[in-house]
Amino acid sequence: MKTTRVLFCRLFVVLYLLQMVTPSSEQFMVKGIKGPILAPFGGEVELSCQLSPPQSARHMEIRWFRNRYTQPIYLYKEGKDLYGETTSRYVERTELLKDAIGEGKVTLRIFNVSVDDDGQYHCFFRDGDFSEEDITEVKVTGGWFPQPQMEWRDSRGDILLPTSKSHSQDRDKLFNMKMTLLLRDAHSGNVACYLRNPLTGQEERTSIVLADELFSQKKIWIIIIITLVTVLISSIAFPSVVFYCQQEQDRCCSWNSPLLVGSVIIISSVVVDVILSVCLYQRQRVPDSDPLFALDAIWAEDMIVALWVLMVFITMLISLIYFKMRDSHRDARPNLGPEAMELADHRLNS
């Protein structure tokens, strides 16, 4: 009996010592997928992680979480899926594939990917007192996210610097891009706006065909001004001057002749228009980077054209009144000799 007790005590001591030197659970490492995983917006993505060395994970706690351990997006514990502890945003949007859990491999599947799913994911394993984790990064892509690269290019492929660039995000946090291009000089051919996703390299473009140089906006209002000046000269000045020169051929080149007076009126009008146009165009304007710069430039050009139309009308009116009064005075004069008529004209002009 005594020998039996001694053997039992020795066996107990040996088992105790073995328990002290042997860890309660086998140590392992967790290996996830390296490099960012591209997740299509509105689609699904799978995140896998594996125990090393391979071993069964059926009895372990498996937890997937984002920023906080206490807010899991999926939790497997004691052989059960604990849906009640899942973060509300991921309820019914996640699934844990456990086909290879006997070898220590599990896969988290996320459905209906949104922009908020972009970021880091922790794959966490716990076996007794020992735990280990790994991190996998997810990049959501598509329509448009993340913020795309945007640029204007001409028909030769050269990049055109924009006047302004801005962006906003809708309720799904997708980007809306806006870029303004102001073409100071006439461009033939076309320009194109390019959008490129920096992650996937996906690129889209839209082209705008420009009119020929003749029909550029600046050319149009310059042609309008030239046309107005031509109308002014042809409709008032020349007929009046020709008429009075025919009536007074002997004095058509004197200082008060209709030819000289009409020329002075036209030249004066053109000079005033040019001065006012330059002052209006060179006034203090909004900077090129301002989104309203293009609108301000168009407004200035429209005002210049309106100014020329107004000045042409005023000049024609002045010419009409002047020659009408001169014609009335001429009809009212008595039939005098040339010397007397010249004296009367001299007094009138004085």
Image (spheres, grey):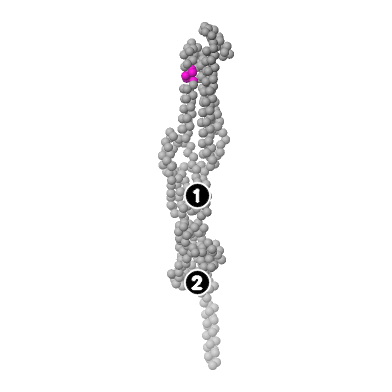
Secondary structure at numbered mark 1? strand
Coordinates of residue 181 in the picture (x, y in percent)? 49, 41
Q: Looking at the image, tell me whether mark 2 or mark 1 is earlier in sequence order.
A: 2
Asked whether 249 falls inside the magenta stretch, the response is no
Q: For the residues labelled 2 and 1, say whether their Cβ atoms are less than 8 Å apart.
A: no
On residue 291, the disc is: none
Q: Is residue 132 at least partly visible in the picture?
A: no
At x 43%, y 42%, the residue is: 208
Coordinates of residue 304 in the picture (x, y in percent)? 52, 31
Q: Main secondary structure of the magenta part?
A: helix
Give the labeled residue for mark 1: 176
In the image, taking residue 282 as reference, residue 193 lies left or right, namely: left
On residue 80, the disc is: 2
Secondary structure at numbered mark 2? strand
Asked whether 240 falls inside the magenta stretch, the response is yes
In the rendered image, the quadrant that contains the N terminus is bottom right
Magenta region: 237-241
At x 53%, y 26%, the residue is: 311
Coordinates of residue 230 in the picture (x, y in percent)? 47, 25
The one nearer the camera, 48 or 179, is: 179
In the rendered image, the quadrant that contains the C terminus is top right
- Structural crowding at the residue carrying mark 2, measured as other residues with C-alpha within 10 Å and reported as few (<14), some (14–19) or many (≥20): few
At x 46%, y 57%, the residue is: 42
At x 48%, y 72%, the residue is: 57
* Location of residue 132 with respect to 257 vertically, above or below: below
Coordinates of residue 16 in the picture (x, y in percent)? 54, 81
Measured Cα–Cα span from mark 2 to mark 1: 43 Å
Count of numbered marks: 2
Name the kind of residue labelled 1 in the image: Asn
- Structural crowding at the residue carrying mark 1, measured as other residues with C-alpha within 10 Å and reported as few (<14), some (14–19) or many (≥20): some
* Location of residue 137 with respect to 238 vertically, above or below: below
Name the kind of residue labelled 2 in the image: Lys
